[in-house]
Image: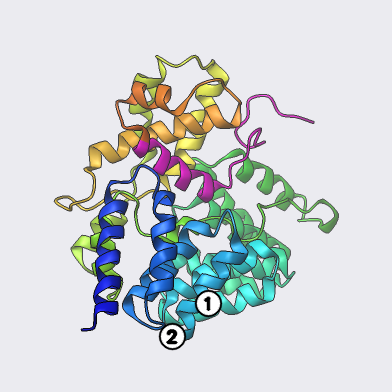
Amino acid sequence: MDGHSQQARELRRQIEWTLARAIDPADVLPMLHRLARLADDGSEESAFAHMHLADLLVERNPWRAALCARRVVVHRPEDDRAWATLALCQTLLGNYRFAVTGYRRALEGAPANPWYAHNLGHLLDVALGRAEDAVSWLQRAYDAAPQSGEVAASFAHALARAGQIPEARKVLTRAIKRGGSREHAALLKWVEQGAPADKDHPLPRPAPVHAIALRRDLSASPTEASADSDKRPDPSSAATKRTARSPAASELEPVLARAMASLPLDAKQRARTKALARDAAGYFAQPAPGSRASSGRSTVDAIAAAVAYAIVYVDHVPLTQSEVAACFRVSVASLRARFAELRAHLDLTPGDARYATQLRR
């Protein structure tokens, strides 16, 4: 091994160590840029640097993130995560046909990934107006992740636009029975009207949900993520099944009730928090017992804190993240990480009509 390669490997180890302890993963951006310049094209260190850069830049600068993801797929055309990240970048840039190609390539490498299938179907339906083509992909996502409110909404929307009104109604009715959101109720109303094109129920921008699913769990150490990057877990293994188990809303609600007694939120905001908790529960997964990731209990507390802060964020309540974190007895870093995931998953915005208590007309 020459000195140049050794230097790149040492810098990668430094980045992994820093990522494991950084409050904000973006703190390592300068080191990642340095590694990207230092590492040889096609090397493990180059792929590591460009993949992490793409992950961290995708929301704030999708064009630069796309350039980084391209560097990975050029040398690793079988890398599903790189293709999915590139597809997400192209979605955010409005290049929907390119994004569709990217998700198709991602699914070639990970055909069982429901979020890739969801985003592909969602793009075909909402961005390209090809609802009939979208249905099969969204069916696949729905079969793999029936607990996801976002997947159910997208699947029902495509079914309705494809003329399958009874099927769309069934999907939405099941979602509402599991604790659906106001979006599901509004979508069901549109479906029951016959899904008129001139009153098409607006879904979020194409494929924003589960963008964070492309990334490694922020609660796990980067060293573990790096070690796992070259092998895909067996979906039938017990560890995978445990990791895939999501905290139920019933687990989050008592934590929310206890901690929110100390927060200056009114009855409407507390009710909205329960609705948001149901939506969040379908996404977040607890780590497997005995793993080096955070424990199930601390994970539930951090998710509950993120849910509470999401209402603070949506309703412009003058509270800081540290004030909310203190009520749940979690670190600010844990709240910030979980809230970042939740905001990306639900595409939350200030004044969001789904969760705000004072809807603007």
Residue 156 inside the magenta-drawn segment: no
Q: Nearer the viewer, residue 23 or 217?
A: 23
In the rendered image of this protein, does residue 192 appear above or below residue 323?
below
* Mark count: 2
Q: Nearer the viewer, residue 141 or 63?
A: 63
What range of the chain is rendered magenta?
333-361
Q: Residue at x 26, y 51 (%)?
A: 287
Residue tagged 2 = 75
In the rendered image of this protein, does residue 171 appear above or below residue 302?
below
Q: Nearer the viewer, residue 206 or 60?
A: 60
Q: Residue most toward the left?
A: 290
Residue 70 is tagged as 1
Q: Residue at x 23, y 68 (%)?
A: 227
Circle 2 — which element?
A: helix
Within the image, what quadrant is residue 12 found in? bottom left
First-in-chain label (1 vs 2): 1
Tell me residue 59's x, y (percent): 56, 55
Residue 58 visible in the snapshot: yes
Q: Is residue 307 left or right of residue 349?
A: left
Q: Is residue 314 left or right of residue 226?
A: right
Q: Residue at x 68, y 76 (%)?
A: 97
Residue 350 inside the magenta-drawn segment: yes
Q: How does the figure colour the protein chain or chains? A: rainbow
Q: Residues within 10 Å of mark 2 (few under 14, many from 20)?
A: some
Q: CA distance from mark 1 to mark 2?
A: 9 Å
Q: Amino acid at mark 2?
A: His
Q: Amino acid at mark 1?
A: Arg
Q: Residue most toward the front?
A: 3
Position of the C terminus, as image quadrant, is: top right
Tell me residue 352's x, y (percent): 64, 36
